[in-house]
Image (spheres, grey):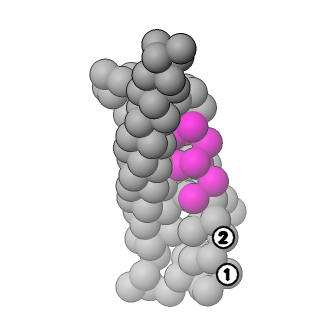
Amino acid sequence: METVWSLVIDIIVTGGLGFALWAADRRHGKYGIMLPVALGVVVACVVWIVLVSAGTGYMSGLIWMPWVLPMALGVAASFVLTKFVERSREKRDIADLNKLLKG
């Protein structure tokens, strides 16, 4: 039961940090509000499942891994993907605008 609480905490923290990441980004109009949140939560859940399946939630020296590692990787993945999507979408929007203005 203790490891299930680590999943719940990972989801709440990663989702909250994903919302904070979206709100802090001054160009968050380039992508949807759920992109960083959903990606962070999915990555955190997959990492948690892998770590718990590997047994790290029950080993005395590695019990921190299902708590900390999914949150860190989830936030990092959401940050990297939002920066990638923001840049690629901005380039595409500028190209579309130039094509429209040229007529």
Element under disc 2 = helix
Say the numbered circle drawn on residue 53. Answer: 1
Foreground residue among 24 and 57: 24
Whether residue 59 is visible: yes
Say the numbered circle drawn on residue 31. Answer: none
- The location of residue 97, given as percent across then percent down, is 47, 19
Q: Are marks 1 and 2 in contact (CB under 8 Å)?
A: yes
Whether residue 17 is visible: no
- The location of residue 86, given as percent across then percent down, is 42, 37
Looking at the image, residue 13 lies above or below residue 73: above
Looking at the image, residue 20 lies above or below residue 78: above
Foreground residue among 96 and 67: 96
Foreground residue among 17 and 29: 29
Q: Please name the residue shown 58% across and 48% down the image.
A: 39
Secondary structure that dominates the magenta span:
helix
Q: Which residues are magenta?
A: 35-43
The answer to whether residue 7 is magenta is no
Gap in angstroms between the C-alphas marked 1 and 2: 6 Å
Foreground residue among 57 and 80: 80
Q: Please name the residue shown 42% across and 48% down the image.
A: 84
- The amino acid sitting under disc 2 is Ile
- The amino acid sitting under disc 1 is Ser
Say the numbered circle drawn on residue 49. Answer: 2
- The location of residue 74, given as percent across then percent down, is 48, 55
Q: Please name the residue shown 60% across and 85% down the image.
A: 55
The answer to whether residue 36 is magenta is yes
Element under disc 1 = helix
Other-residue count near label 2 (Cα within 10 Å), few / some / many at <14 / 14–19 / ≥20: some
Looking at the image, residue 70 lies above or below residue 40: below
Q: Please name the residue shown 39% across and 40% down the image.
A: 87
Q: Left or right? Give the position of 34 relative to 1.
A: left
Looking at the image, residue 103 lies above or below residue 68: above
